[in-house]
Amino acid sequence: DTQMTQSPSSLSASVGDRVTITCRASQGIRNYLAWYQQKPGKVPKLLIYAASTLQSGVPSRFSGSGSGTDFTLTISSLQPEDVATYYCQKYNSGPWTFGQGTKVEIK
Amino acid sequence: QAQLVQSGAEVKKPGASVKVSCQASGYTFTAYYIHWVRQAPGQGLEWMGWINSNSGGTSYAQKFQGRVTMTRDTSISTAYMEVSRLISDDTAVYYCARDLAAAPENAFDIWGQGTMVTVSS
């Protein structure tokens, strides 16, 4: 099975900072990669699919890039409401594995 | 608007079974797959499997083969996920989620509110 590894596991940044989270697949998955945001006690929310396509209604400060095995999620200017855990997920074929998550906090 | 509404919290004893429901509204139920994902307390997301809401075909993560059964009732736009032979490690929030574009190889755009299943003697 393809493993999904995120880094870092957690980060603390100031409001307005540019934040980057990486996700690495152990095998190539083309662009079959999604990013989700999960706020504490809430349901996961789709942010980005097909590695770089912004889901409707998601703020434009979120962006995604990558293909094959290496992917990034970028928050261009961190806002207080972005405090959450972010997960990447592969969906090219089963199993639809998630990364272990990256917890983002405000410094 | 499209939404998924799940059944309420459950408390079960080890060895028992639990069946969680996920009722769809606001879209054509049979046009999309439903996936099931679970999250143990303080842990990450774990994909369990999917069901083709039209044909009833299923695909399960290897870890759950033989212990999880996914079914659906198209007459009431509802998907079900049953876990048998429960153990304490099955304590988790169980989510249903819809695929983005009518095929399993897609991200999940609509999620249910989650169902907490607690396994305790």
Image (cartoon, coloured by chain):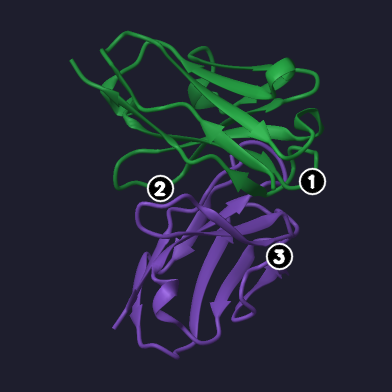
Chain colours: A purple, B green
Q: Residue B79, how many percent across, how many down?
A: 62, 23
Picture layout, residue B109 above or below residue B73:
below
Residue type highlighted by circle 1: Ala
Residue contact between numbered discs 3 and 1, judged by CB atoms under 8 Å: no
Packing grade of label 2 (10 A; few <14, some 14-19, many >=20) is: some
Q: Which mark is residue A56?
A: 3
Residue that carries the numbered disc 2 in the rendered image:
B44
Packing grade of label 1 (10 A; few <14, some 14-19, many >=20) is: some
Which dot, 3 or 1, sits closer to the camera? 3
Q: Residue B88, how many percent across, how many down?
A: 26, 23
Q: Residue furthest left?
A: B121
Disc 1 to disc 2, C-alpha distance: 24 Å
Do badges 3 and 1 share one subunit? Answer: no
**Residue placed most toward the observer, B101 or B59:** B101
Horizontal arrangement in the rendering, residue A35 relative to residue B8 (left or right): right
Tell me which numbered mark, 1 or 2, is placed earlier along the sequence. Answer: 2
Q: Residue A63, how many percent across, how many down?
A: 64, 75
Packing grade of label 3 (10 A; few <14, some 14-19, many >=20) is: few
Residue type highlighted by circle 3: Ser
**Residue placed most toward the observer, A39 or B91:** A39
Q: Quadrant of residue A83?
A: bottom left
Residue that carries the numbered disc 1 in the rendered image:
B101
Q: Quadrant of residue A102?
A: bottom left
Horizontal arrangement in the rendering, residue A59 relative to residue B17 (left or right): right
Residue type highlighted by circle 2: Gly
Disc 2 to disc 3, C-alpha distance: 25 Å
Which dot, 2 or 3, sits closer to the camera? 3
Residue at left offset 54%, top offset 63%? A23
